[in-house]
Amino acid sequence: MSLENWLNDKLIVRHRASAGEIVELLHICDRDLEKAEIIELGPDWRLSIAHNAAVQTAKAALAAAGYRARKEGQHYLVLQSLASTIKTDTSVIDQLDKFRQKRNISDYERAGMVTEQEAEEMIALAKQLRADVEHWLRVRYPHLAKAI
């Protein structure tokens, strides 16, 4: 589904991003990636924090492209939007969605579901996504990336 279809379905709204907004979203990502490296937090929290880093990065890409997700289902939507914004491969988006679901179970239903390996995979995925979005911003939207 395209971003225009999502706009027509009222899943997203038009949005004019500023360089400051993009910097702030990526700053939150960087902060979360730093915290996700703290082993003592345990795999559940580390995955959740890294997941948030990925969401903030995807929000930055969506904002740069001229949109903002509505609140309901926001995490799912912004991660799915990566296929349209930075052309992320569907296998990567599927992996992000798997971790989103795991995070939801861990946060809301049952602790101890996340392995150390899964936490590390989510951290690595969030770091790669951060790098990919920054590169995309510098190429496609240099006026929004100037302060990164």
Image (tube, rainbow, N blue to C red):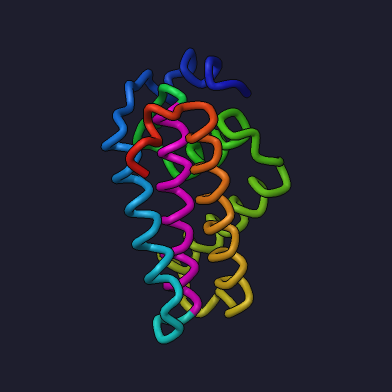
Residue 126 in the image: x percent, y percent? Answer: 53, 57
Could you tell me which residue is drawn at 48 percent across and 42 percent down? 58
Left or right: where 32 falls relative to 18: right
Number of numbered discs present? 0
Residue 123 in the image: x percent, y percent? Answer: 53, 65
Q: Is residue 54 above or below residue 133?
A: below
Question: Would you say residue 115 is visible in this rendering?
Answer: yes
Question: Would you say residue 108 is visible in this rendering?
Answer: no
Decide which of 126, 143 is in the foreground and name it: 143
Could you tell me which residue is drawn at 51 percent across and 80 percent down? 112
Residue 109 in the image: x percent, y percent? Answer: 45, 67
Could you tell me which residue is drawn at 50 percent across and 37 percent down? 77
The outermost residue toward the bottom is 40
Could you tell me which residue is drawn at 54 percent across and 31 percent down? 139
Q: Is residue 43 above or below residue 141?
A: below
Quadrant in the picture for residue 113:
bottom right
Decide which of 140, 130 is in the foreground and name it: 140
Left or right: where 14 falls relative to 99: left
- The residues colored magenta run 43-64
Q: Is residue 100 above or below residue 93?
A: below
Query: Which secondary structure type mostly characterizes the magenta part of the structure?
Result: helix
Left or right: where 41 falls relative to 84: left
41 inside magenta stretch = no
Q: Which of the image's four quarters has the C terminus?
A: top left
Q: Is residue 106 above or below residue 62?
A: below
